[in-house]
Image (cartoon, helix red, strand yellow):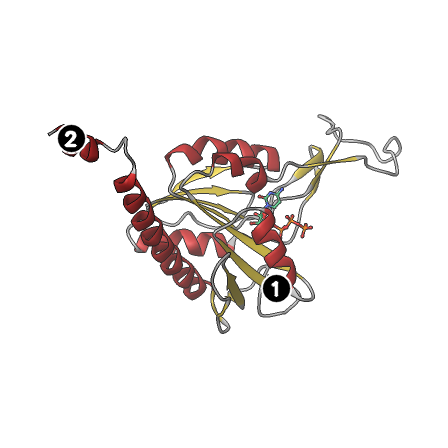
Amino acid sequence: MKIVITAGPTREHIDPVRFISNRSTGKMGFAIAASAIAHGHQVTLIAGPVSLATPEGALRIDVISALDMLDAVRCELPSADVLIMSAAVADWRPKEASTTKLKKSTMAPTIELLPNPDILLTLKPSKENRLFVGFAAETGDPLAEAKRKLTAKGLDMMVANDVSRPDAGFAVDTNLVTLLYPNAPAEHLPLLDKRQVADEIITRIEKLHNELNIMISSSSSRNPCNASNLTARLS
Ligand code: CTP
């Protein structure tokens, strides 16, 4: 499979030295990229500003803002089988970004924000037979929110994690996740290293992809326009 993975935060610049961002370090997304490569898949890693080495064999595209990330995903999607959005995309950006450093004496005390596009929702119309996987980083009860986002964003799998735990979520090497699907029971994984979580995610994606291929090939064999059916009818 060709798998496009987004990772890390996005930065929304206020001026050349200040920005709005979040605590994501990219560790989970980079672990997924390394796992996918180890499983023999082709990987494009679209990374926000992070300080991690590129997993050997991945094609890496560096981006800064949510709008840059949307452009990069849009470019890579047509050739992809799977999109994994593990990036923590900033939901808002300053309405105006100054090209020169704002002096505090002249800086307004409020920053006007605009909503960023939701990358998964924006690209949902182009999903076709691709698998879309999301991450829900939540505080409190992650499952209810993750399920809502799974449905709203039309995903095949949602990885829910509670980022308020010290041993899960941002910046640590372990994660505690629940995998949610539209038509199958949730799977609660134990606390694992992010690389082990990544291996579990890639294995599930391979299974979903195989199931999808079986469905596509059985529906195309029923398609009256299918080339082999046409030959059979002509002969
Ligand atoms: N996501 C996205 N585009 C955005 C924001 C989020 O594609 N502008 C993706 C994330 O990469 C993740 C999923 O949507 O896979 C859920 O992201 P999350 O931040 O948990 O949820 P939001 O949709 O941003 O909702 P909220 O901030 O209200 O929790």
Quarter of the picture holding the C terminus: top left
Q: Are marks 1 and 2 in contact (CB under 8 Å)?
A: no
Mark 1 crowdedness (10 Å alpha carbons): few <14, some 14-19, many ≥20: many
Dot 1: what SS? helix
| Residue lying at 64% horizontally and 62% vertically, measured from the top left | 144
Q: Quadrant of residue 171?
A: bottom right
Name the spot of residue 223 as percent of width and height, x first. Answer: 29, 37
Three-letter amino acid code at the position of disc 2: Thr
Label 1 near ligand 1 (CB < 8 Å)? no
Image position, residue 32 (x, y; %): 43, 55
Nearer-the-camera pick, 78 or 58 = 78
State the mark number for residue 143.
1
Q: Tell which of 104 and 163 is nearer to you.
A: 163
Q: Which residue is mark 2?
A: 231
| Camera-side residue of 108 and 133 | 133
Numbered label tally? 2
- At 56% from the left edge and 33% from the top edge, which residue is drawn? 68
C-alpha gap between disc 1 and disc 2 = 50 Å
Using the rendered image of the protein, determine whether residue 112 is visible from the camera's viewpoint.
Answer: yes
Tag 1: residue type? Leu
Residue 65: in sight, yes or no?
A: no
Query: Dot 2: within a 10 Å radius of its alpha carbon, few (fewer than 14), some, or many (20 or more) residues?
Result: few
Residue that protrudes farthest toward the bottom in the picture:
190
Does residue 20 sit above or below 26 in this rendering?
above
Query: Residue placed farthest to the top in the image?
Result: 99
Which marked residue is nearer to the observer: mark 1 or mark 2?
2
Q: Earlier in the sequence, mark 1 or mark 2?
A: 1
The structure residue drawn at horizontal position 87% and vertical position 34%, both measured from the top left corner, is 108
**Label 2 element class:** helix
Q: Is residue 39 above or below residue 191?
A: above
Q: Where's residue 1, x and y in %?
A: 32, 45
